[in-house]
Amino acid sequence: WNGTAAPCSSAGSAPGLFEAAALQSGRRVAVVFEGEAVSYGELERRTSGLAGRVLGCAGEVVGLCVEKSVEEVAGMVGIMRAGRAYVPLDPRLPAERLGYLVGQCGCGAVVAQRRFEELVQGLKGSSCCAVLVVVAESVVAATGNAGGSQAVEAAVAEGLAYVLFTSGSTGR
């Protein structure tokens, strides 16, 4: 029933494995969320555009301020396809906490859904160079020093994929 094991190169990166799946299964469904289904081919197109914009930003880590959605998956994959790591930024958190996370990670950019653009604009002083606004189809706007290249940088298997903060006893 769940026999999904398949051989895979130990040298492969998560974005590389995604790209291989997109080439092999472009029309197959990759993500389903609340009735919205997106194919591998469509997700590849969306994440290429985002990756190209992220490449124009400094830093190894990019903030991702989105609600649970297809855009969240596209944001994760797009950021990693640009050879960067992402840090999830829960838009329900206070701006002070989000600023702390962005500052600790040295985020060169924050990717956000349009409804959180104002929230993340306030984080720019923390170290961000750009705020990239995403909608279901693609990156639609950018502020700061974001480039427009569509090139995708090769991620390496040993590279950082994401940063997670746990509250612990101090919240730091």
Image: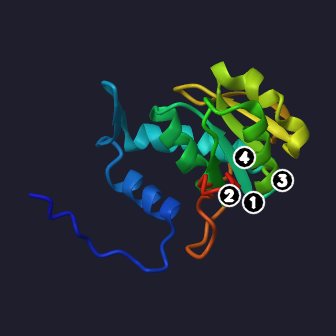
Residue at screen point 52% across, 26% down: 136
Q: Which mark is residue 54?
A: 4
Residue 28's quadrant in the figure?
top left
- Is the residue under label 2 in contact with that under label 4 (CB below 8 Å)? yes
Q: Position of residue 123 (x, y in %)?
A: 82, 35
Q: Residue furthest left?
A: 1
Mark earlier in primary sequence (1, 2): 1
Amino acid carrying label 2: it is Arg
Q: Position of residue 117 (x, y in %)?
A: 72, 24
Quadrant for the C terminus in the image? bottom right
Q: Residues within 10 Å of mark 2 (few under 14, many from 20)?
A: many
Q: Which residue is mark 1?
A: 60
- Secondary structure type for disc 3: loop
- Is the residue under label 2 in contact with that under label 1 (CB below 8 Å)? yes
Q: Residues within 10 Å of mark 1 (few under 14, many from 20)?
A: many
Q: Which residue is mark 3?
A: 58
Relative to 22, residue 123 above or below: above
- Is 3 placed left or right of 153 in the picture? left
Residue at screen point 59% across, 55% down: 166
CA separation, marks 3 and 1?
Answer: 7 Å
Amino acid carrying label 4: it is Val
CA separation, marks 4 and 1?
Answer: 10 Å
CA separation, marks 1 and 2?
Answer: 5 Å
Foreground pick, 170 / 46: 170
Mark earlier in primary sequence (4, 1): 4
Q: Position of residue 171 (x, y in %)?
A: 67, 51
Q: Which residue is mark 2?
A: 84
Foreground pick, 48 / 54: 54
